[in-house]
Amino acid sequence: MYSLIFLGIVSFGLTLFLTPIVRNLAWHFGIVDQPDQPRKIHSAPIPRLGGVAIFTAVVGTYFILLIVRLSSGAIVWEDLPLVMRLVPALAVVFGIGLADDLLTVSPWIRLAAETGAAVLAWIGGIRISALDGYTFSGIAISFVVTILWIVTCTNAINLIDGVDGLATGVSLFAACTMLIAALLEHNYPMALAVVPLAGSLLGFLRYNFSPASIFLGDSGSLTLGFLVGCFGAVWAEKSTTLLGLTAPFMVLSIPLFDVALAIARRTLRGKSLFAADDAHIHHKLLSRGLTPRKLLFTIYGICALSATASILLTVNHNQNRDFVLVLVCLSAWLGLQQLGYSEFGIAKRLMFSGTIRSALSAQLALDTFEQDVNGDITLEESCNMLCKTCPQFGFSGMVFEVDEVKHAWGINDGWHARLDFPGHGYITVWRDTKSLSGSAASVLFIDSVSRVLVQKLNRLHFVSNE
Amino acid sequence: MKVKPLIFVWCVLICDIYGLILLNCWRLNYYFLAALDSSRWFHFIIYTIAATIPLVVLKKVRYVIASFVPLAIAVAAEAFRSDVSSSALRSQTVPADLFGFAAGILLGLNICTLRRSTKALGNGNREPRDG
């Protein structure tokens, strides 16, 4: 226990001491984040190597513990393998983050490095071998789930790092919850691994809280996400088998929800998954008029609630987990509605208000029309076909004057579109301004009529010349 | 004053909840009711519906809060009911009631938000066309 307190205090003190030094070095070498993009909400350049201070403090704390040789040093040495096994993977993640801070790294290279680090962690023994109480039958499933979990967590913390103190605070909540869970379950190795992270995050928050004087940077956010993901996997593995990933999932609910939204949003928009945008949860809350501090306290409040719920789940050995999951889903739904993402509203309308069905029937009607007119029929029959198809696209009237065929049909009221066929004549179609049916398909219909009739006239002209 | 049908459903549900608490299911051998009463999911669903209806139907906040009072009393009564001898069963059903209550509030809020956004969307679509 003394070792834990010692680790916490030393890492907290080290971060308090190291962060200003790293900040000054970043200023000196010009490694600052410029407020030159619309997504950036800070007004002045801010150093962005906070991750270096956290990483150095966490690693330094273990060294100091081993040098000081507390009475419990032997126990610590026995339990340190968890930390030691993580070191190579952590070095890879921190390295790629630092490279991204200093230079610009392609998102694919970054993803490859994160996956590589997750593989190293898996080799080092960080494994999720059961989910929801069911043990995976093959090692391959465990491998895939573990890699997916760690890479998702790494990117989740990286994505929410858009407001001063947000990623640090969320990670601090996660680390503290994991520490409490580890202590409750007498999981000493995990407690030893989490304490320095929690201490250094608390120390770093002193400089990173709004208004921040230093940012985490990619070196910090990726490292934090990776560590939190690994500790979550250890928590899921060591806790009672039924708990599975529920508790770690709840602790990281905000970042994971944000990453899920980002993937869904970009897929719906047909954008690259790596394309940056200003529609993350924190951007949405800021656009609703929240100040950065109010936003922080709102998200900290949600994190505190979900952390309490996950601790209660751990204490109660998973009783009422199903009810908690229902509540989490309902809260997520409410949050999603309150955030007002237009993508999801439009997708819902397309799916449930019959838009897809009407688009499909319009497309089918267009196909039938094009096939019929392209077939071996006369111009007069084509005119009749047009009269028959017009109402399906909301057109109420038509004037057809092409070559020798002259025909008028319906009510010529509302707006109209005139299609000219030079040397042959014209077609005018009328649509009632109050008509709501097939408004989008009507444009497709006009385009189709124009295209098909030109082909038809050319063909008829060619036949008559022969 | 026009009373909405869902309010009747809500009243019936509240009566059922109190009926289950007051009826000595175990002693009078109402086996079916006893089986229902011991189901956590039954408690959860009943309380979810009972908490959702006022939020969806009633417009004034004070009426909604007032409608939660009988539910809160029911949960309290459930915790202190004497007919269930097993404390293990009570420790399962009371949290289910509370979780159901919370889920009902969340579901009600979701439905209200959904209805508001649909209404706003409908107005937004219609106005330019009418104009």
Image (cartoon, coloured by chain):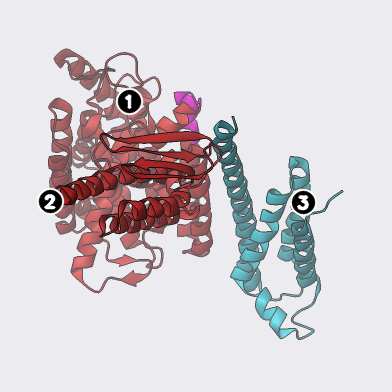
Chain colours: A red, B cyan
Q: CA distance from mark 2 to mark 1?
A: 66 Å
Provide the major secondary structure of the magenta segment.
Answer: helix
Which chain is disc 2 placed on?
A
Q: Residue at x 40, y 22 (%)?
A: A210
Q: CA distance from mark 3 to mark 2?
A: 86 Å
Q: Amino acid at mark 1?
A: Arg
User: Do residues under tags 2 and 1 come within 8 Å of each other at their CB atoms?
Assistant: no
Q: Secondary structure at mark 2?
A: loop
Q: Secondary structure at mark 1?
A: loop
Q: CA distance from mark 3 to mark 1?
A: 45 Å
**Left or right: where A146 falls relative to A299:** left
User: Do residues under tags 3 and 2 come within 8 Å of each other at their CB atoms?
Assistant: no
**Which label lies toward us, 3 or 1?**
1
If you read the primary sequence from the N terminus, does the residue marked by circle 2 or circle 1 appear first?
Answer: 1
Checking the image for residue A39, the label placed there is 1
* Residue situated in front as seen by the camera: A458 or A275: A458
Q: Is disc 2 surrounded by few (<14), some (14 to 19) or many (20+) residues within 10 Å?
A: few
